[in-house]
Amino acid sequence: MLRVGSIVTGDIANLNVLGYLNSPDTELVAVCDVNNQKMVEKLQRWGLRTTKAYTDYKKMVDKEDLDIIEILTPHHLHYPMTEYCANAGVPGISVQKPMAHTITDCVKMIEICKEQNVKLKIFENFRFYPVYLRAKELLDQGIIGDLLNFRIITVLLGGPAMPRDLESLKWRIKVDMCGGGPLIYDDGIHKFSMALWLMGEERVEKVYSWIDYFTAVMEAPSTIFWKYPSKNPDDPPKYGSMEFKFSANLYYPSNYYDCDEFIEITGTKGMMWINQCTAGGNFLSKCPQFPPIVVYVDGEVKSYGEDLVRDWRYSFINSTEHFIKVMNQGGEPIYTGEQGKDLCIFAKMPYISQQQNRSVLWEEINPENEDNRSCVVEEPIDADQSGLTNFYRRKMKDLRKGLKQGLKHKKFIYEFEQ
Ligand SMILES: NC(=O)c1ccc[n+]([C@@H]2O[C@H](COP(=O)([O-])OP(=O)(O)OC[C@H]3O[C@@H](n4cnc5c(N)ncnc54)[C@H](O)[C@@H]3O)[C@@H](O)[C@H]2O)c1
């Protein structure tokens, strides 16, 4: 039985814990959070009566003889916590995406885990969402030919969705804690992950972007374009793009965050559309117009994945099960530290492009250029705490308007709590 400890009990811990609660191979022996009240509430919610609670992660690590540690903190803490756990002899460290707030920290995390023979997993769960796994299988079978173009739209919505702790947004708008912003760096990592994995690529060549700070705190509306590297001179060029859009008064229930994703992939002989991810399972999923995967090829439209569960929580459970297997049977975690670092590089490129109004090359995002500050993400000029309050006021106003117009639910309850 693997002994698991988790630092911390914030918003995402509710989903991160599921893979351990369901596992016959692990026991969640301890959790830690500086916020004791929140931690106690979470343990009650998860039905854990024997799990120990600590407010100092170092004490937890020193006392509990852990096999696996989950690090679910704000990003600037990922490196110091990984370093402490690795030096203390914890053999498996799972760090939530993004790997760190700087590339410099990513490199240090890789080095320390290598030195201490630690399995370092970067926890990016979209990579384990059942619909995306099926889409990848189809793409690898060549269903739409060679892949030419990737496009992902994230729609941010009026909800209703799961309630969020306002504190969890405050650190996300601070570049020195987050590494970028809440959308492109924090959430975007998932989407950059899909842009590489689904397309069978490991990196991009260059990125250009427009980022608007309409709400003064979040990077939306924004549009990001990139080119994948050419492997052979005769191959057709390959591009991709990503958009974040606010539709604050769109009635769109989500079991989790108030956003959803739509992907379109163009190949040499067909096209694929992948409908929904984070909010999968809502009424849009149940209508015939939005099957999980749609493919057009040879004059025919076919849909796939209707047999799959469309619930985002399984991406977390699958990802945790994968790590438990790696810890028990060996193998490389998905993602490795190197891959986690690459995702951070990709997710920083749009900010540099916006700041310097030019295309940014992959090689430019590195520890040296962080050190000499030629390529670092800066706080957006107009982002401040009052912007966050204004954003929430606006969201509440839109929600009230939505309720008047027939919106049915204004409060969200987790499906597994009903
Ligand atoms: N995989 C996903 O889809 C997903 C979704 C959301 C968040 N995340 C990631 O999970 C991590 C946490 O995000 P969140 O939304 O849960 O954050 P959060 O703000 O809700 O929670 C952070 C928690 O950290 C605690 N904390 C802060 N400093 C601490 C310290 N020094 N010691 C102990 N506890 C400390 C706070 O009390 C809080 O409970 C981030 O890396 C984030 O990017 C991943």
Image (tube, helix red, strand yellow):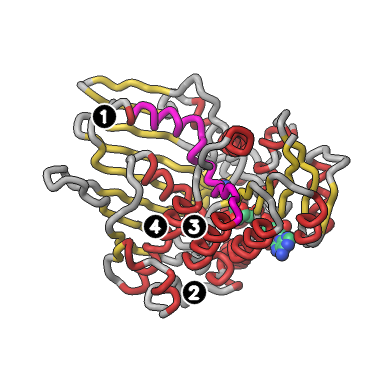
Which of discs 1 and 4 lies nearer the camera? The answer is 4
Residue type (three-letter) at the residue carrying disc 3: Leu
Identify the residue at image location x=76%, y=59%.
Answer: 57
Quadrant the C terminus occupies: top right
Between the residue at mark 2 and the residue at mark 1, the CA separation in whole angstroms equals 41 Å
Q: Is residue 217 left or right of residue 403?
A: left
Q: Earlier in the sequence, mark 1 or mark 4?
A: 1
Q: Which secondary structure lies at badge 4? A: helix
Q: Label 4, on which residue?
A: 346
Does the magenta-highlighted stretch encompass residue 161?
Answer: no
Q: Estimate the x, y position of residue 155 in percent, counting from the top left.
A: 46, 48
Identify the residue at image location x=33%, y=21%.
Answer: 302
Q: Which secondary structure lies at badge 3? A: helix
Residue type (three-letter) at the residue carrying disc 2: Glu
Q: Is residue 165 visible?
A: no
Identify the residue at image location x=25%, y=20%.
Answer: 300
Does the magenta-highlighted stretch encompass residue 137?
Answer: yes
Label 4 crowding class (10 Å Cα cut-off): few <14, some 14-19, many 20+?
A: many
Q: Estimate the x, y position of residue 239 in percent, counting from the top left.
A: 25, 49
Q: Label 3, on which residue?
A: 183
Q: Earlier in the sequence, mark 4 or mark 3?
A: 3
Q: Label 1, on which residue?
A: 144
Disc ID at residue 359:
none
Disc ID at residue 379:
2
Quadrant the N terminus occupies: top right
- The answer to the question of whether label 4 and label 3 lie on touching residues, with beta carbons closer than 8 A, is no
Q: Which secondary structure lies at badge 1? A: loop
Q: Is residue 285 visible?
A: yes
